[in-house]
Image (cartoon, rainbow, N blue to C red):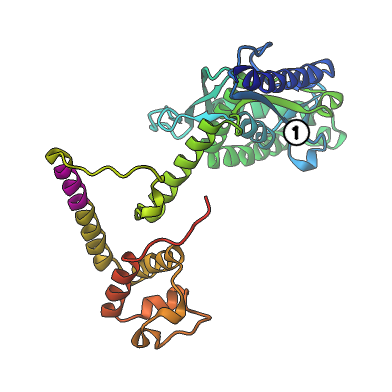
Amino acid sequence: MNAKKTAPSKEIETSGIKELDVYRKQKANVLVPTTKIAGLSDFHKPVVDEVYLSSNPEDGDVYYDKITKKWRITKVGLNKLSVVAGIIWHPTECRRTDNRSDRDYVSFQAVGGIRKADGTPVFFKSEFDIDMDVVRDEAHDLYSKKYRDQDWFKKMSEKNQEVYVQDKIRNEIIQKRKHKLKLCESGAMNRVIRSLLGLKSGYTKEELAKPFVMVRIVLQPDYDDKDVRKMLIERSMDAMAGIYGDRPTTANSFPQEEIIDITDESEVSDAETNNTEKKDDLDSKRIDFENSSPEDQAKTLSILIAKKGYKYADLPKDIQDGCTEDNYSDTDFLVEMQPGNKMNFYDKLMGMLDSDIPF
C-alpha cells in the first residue's frame, strides 16, 4: 500500500522539478529562493506559475530608462509578480514613520513576507522618504541641463531662463507634495518586492519576452485512499453544519450492526444531558430568530426552505396568501409575512428532517 502511494507522488514531484529545470535552461526569470526542491511528502507537489510582462510601455508594466538603456518594472508590473508570488504585507508595520511636523518631509516603512517552497517564511523591511528640498535641487539641475543646449532657451535672458526653470520646478514640487505619501508608500513596497523576488534593476526586451516563474507547493492527497476520502467527507459535513446547523440524526444514519441496550446509569445521564443541550441550542436559535430583523428572518427562512426541501403546496392556506409558486422562495415575500406566521413557519421547518444534500 505504501508503494502505491509513494510512486505517483514521487512521479509528480519529479515532474514539477523537471519543469523548473526547463525554465532555467531557457534562462527564464525564475523567482524562487532555492535551487533545489527535494524531500516533499507523498501528499505535496510543486506547481509552477508564470507571468508575462509586456515590453510595451503603453501597457503600464515597464518603462524605459534612458540612462541604463534598459526597461524597469513599474508598480503595476511589480504588483502582478507579488500576487503570483503570494507576498503578504504586515498590517501594523507598514506605516508612516516621520513625526509629521515637517510638511516638506515624509517617510514610509513597508514590511512584506513570502514563503519559500519548503514553507519557511522570509520577511524584508524597507523605508522610502521624500525631502522636498532635495527634490527641488534635483529638479533644478535636471531642467537646467535639459534646456541649456536648446537654441530657443539660449535666446532668452538669464533672468527669463531662471523664471522658466523655476516655473517647471514649481509644477513638479506641487505634484510631489500632493502625492508624497502615496509615492513613499509605493517606493517602500517596490523595494521590498524587488528584494524578496530577487528582481534586477533593469531588463532587456529579450529578457522581458521570457516568463517570470514562481514555484509553490500545494497539497494533493491520494483521493483513492479510503482514509483520505473519509476525512474529506467529514470536513465537508462540518463545513455544511457551520452554515446550516447540525443535521438531525435518523435511524438510517447508523450502520446496520447489533443494537446494544444502554443500562449504565452514567451513560443514560450523559444521553439525557446531550438531549438537554440540543434542546437549549434550539431554544437559543429560536430566540435569535425572533429578535432578528425582518430581512434577516427572511434570509433564514429561505435557507431553511432549501435545506428542508419544503414545497409550496405544503404551505398552510393562511400563509399562501401573498405568494405564488413562482415567487415562493423570494425573500421579498418572506419579509412581508406576518410575524406570527413567520414564527409558525420557522418552527415547522426546524422540526423537519433535512433533504438529501450532495457534498
Q: Residues within 10 Å of mark 1 (few under 14, many from 20)?
A: many
Q: Position of residue 143 (x, y in %)?
A: 72, 31
Q: Is residue 320 above or below residue 217?
A: below
Q: Is residue 141 visible?
A: no
Residue displayed at 48% across by 32% down: 104
Q: Which residue is mark 1?
A: 62
Decide which of 300, 316 is in the foreground and name it.
316
Front position in the image: 125 or 246: 246
Q: Is residue 1 left or right of residue 239?
A: right
Vertical arrangement, residue 221 with respect to residue 243, above or below: above
Could you tell me which residue is drawn at 76 percent across and 35 percent down? 157
Look at the image and tell me in which quarter the N terminus lies. top right
Q: In this image, 195 relative to 273: left or right? A: right
> Is residue 78 positioned above or below 35 on the image?
below
Q: Main secondary structure of the magenta part?
A: helix
Residue 300: percent from left, percent from top: 37, 65
Q: Is 300 left or right of 67, judged from the image as shown?
A: left
Residue lying at 38% horizontally and 62% vertically, measured from the top left: 353
* Helix, strand or loop status at disc 1: strand
Q: In the rendered structure, which segment of residues is drawn in magenta?
A: 268-277
